[in-house]
Image (cartoon, rainbow, N blue to C red):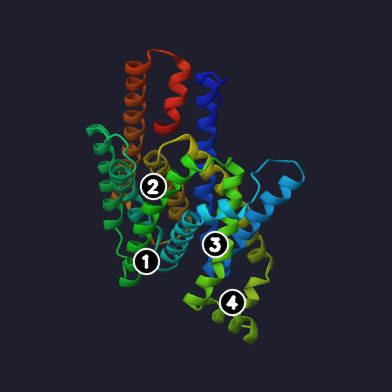
């Protein structure tokens, strides 16, 4: 996201700000979605409202000249459609995993993605093979998260099925979206507009496939407790906050994808979950104990080690190829540094 005229410190500050924004929006969105689903138990409808808010918000703010996004064209939409489909599947499996499993189960499968993305980056995107220290840090994250979940027994076959589907789709999404944002040439708000609008168009298909539309209509028709809750003030606030944070995570997510590598972006997402776990420990009674929290600290240490390993490797590569020029270092950090 840095420009050629930015100093290394300015570029680092910008990248750090994007990562912090993504971390906060990602972590809080998980909590808000968890609360919103308890008030409105229709995950597909909730994500539909998020897509609609994000797409309409970007379009409206663009018309009011508060931001600039690329013009929506059918030709570009056709190129972006596969990425939007993968993104929708990742969110779809994510919400269903959270519906059928606890936060602990979600974390352990989410923590698997950096290792798989690193392998996929090397195999399919021809990225340099991660160093031994980088792989070690990824395995520390993995083992820490596995140890955390092993202290909790909230596993079911349904949850594992959704977890496996989520693992496959999120790994594909992390690598493929990185390929799209690196080659399509749209600005950040353009990506947000295309991604959310196309996901919005895809939503009715999955409503029908999952049968959720029938459940919604039946709930409204019979005026069940779920439909009554939908029109309560706390439910409205939860859904509204979920939609706003959905827009924020769209912006920060795509901005981070452009600024850092796919693996670094994935690790950032894993670290985001520590805030979610902290809140989970405070508001729910089903969570791991002291040993589980120790394992979480281990995963956090792995995330720090990963950041240090890719930063040092990036700096050494730039110095060997382009000397000590600060501007070149900034450009290198766009693809390798958290």
Q: Residue 158, located in which quarter of the rendered image?
A: bottom left
Q: In terms of sequence position, does the residue under pointer 2 or pointer 4 come before the other? A: 2
Residue 269's tag is: none
Q: In terms of depth relative to the viewer, which is nearer, 3 or 32?
A: 3
Q: Residues within 10 Å of mark 1 (few under 14, many from 20)?
A: many
**Could you tell me residue 79's position as x and y percent?**
51, 52
Q: In terms of sequence position, does the residue under pointer 1 or pointer 2 come before the other? A: 1
Q: In terms of sequence position, does the residue under pointer 3 or pointer 1 come before the other? A: 3
Query: Is 298 situated left or right of 9 in this image?
Result: left
Give the residue at mark 4: 226
Q: Residues within 10 Å of mark 2 (few under 14, many from 20)?
A: many
Given the current orientation, which residue lies at the most extreme top position? Answer: 324
Q: What's the distance in space between the residues labelled 3 and 1, CA to CA?
A: 20 Å
Q: Is residue 38 at least partly visible in the picture?
A: no
Give the residue at mark 2: 175
Q: What's the distance in space between the residues labelled 4 and 1, CA to CA?
A: 24 Å
Q: Secondary structure at mark 1?
A: helix
Mark whose residue sits in front, 2 or 4: 2
Give the residue at mark 3: 35
Give the residue at mark 1: 162
Q: Residue at x 54, y 65 (%)?
A: 202
Q: Are marks 2 and 4 in contact (CB under 8 Å)?
A: no
Q: In terms of sequence position, does the residue under pointer 3 or pointer 4 come before the other? A: 3
Q: Secondary structure at mark 2?
A: helix
The quadrant of the image that shows the C terminus is top left
């Amino acid at each position: 996201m840095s420009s050629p005229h930015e100093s290394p410190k300015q570029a680092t500050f910008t990248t750090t700000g994007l990562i912090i924004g993504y971390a906060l929006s990602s972590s809080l969105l998980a909590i808000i979605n968890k609360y919103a689903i308890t008030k409105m138990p229709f995950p597909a409808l909730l994500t539909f409202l998020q897509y609609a808010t994000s797409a309409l918000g970007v379009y409206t703010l663009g018309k009011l000249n508060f931001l600039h996004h690329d013009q929506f064209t059918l030709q570009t939409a056709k190129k972006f459609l596969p990425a939007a489909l993968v993104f929708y599947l990742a969110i779809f499996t994510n919400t269903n995993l959270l519906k059928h499993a606890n936060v602990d189960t979600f974390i352990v499968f989410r923590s698997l993605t950096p290792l798989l993305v690193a392998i996929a980056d090397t195999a399919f995107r021809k990225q340099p093979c991660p160093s031994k220290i980088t792989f070690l840090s990824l395995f520390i994250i993995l083992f820490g998260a596995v140890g955390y979940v092993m202290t909790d027994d909230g596993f079911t076959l349904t949850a594992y099925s959704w977890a496996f589907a989520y693992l496959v789709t999120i790994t594909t999404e992390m690598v493929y979206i990185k390929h799209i944002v690196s080659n399509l040439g749209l600005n950040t708000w353009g990506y947000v507009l295309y991604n959310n609008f196309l996901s919005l168009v895809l939503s009715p298909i999955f409503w029908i496939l999952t049968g959720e539309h029938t459940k919604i209509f039946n709930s409204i028709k019979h005026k069940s407790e779920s439909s009554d809750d939908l029109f309560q003030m706390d439910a409205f606030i939860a859904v509204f906050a979920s939609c706003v944070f959905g827009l924020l995570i769209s912006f920060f997510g795509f901005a981070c994808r452009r600024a850092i590598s796919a693996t670094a972006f994935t690790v950032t997402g894993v670290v985001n979950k520590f805030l979610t776990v902290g809140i989970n420990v405070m508001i729910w009674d089903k969570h791991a104990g002291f040993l589980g929290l120790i394992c979480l600290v281990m995963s956090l240490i792995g995330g720090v080690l990963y950041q240090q390993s890719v930063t040092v490797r990036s700096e050494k590569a730039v110095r060997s190829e382009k000397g000590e020029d600060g501007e070149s270092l900034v450009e290198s950090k766009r693809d390798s540094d958290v």
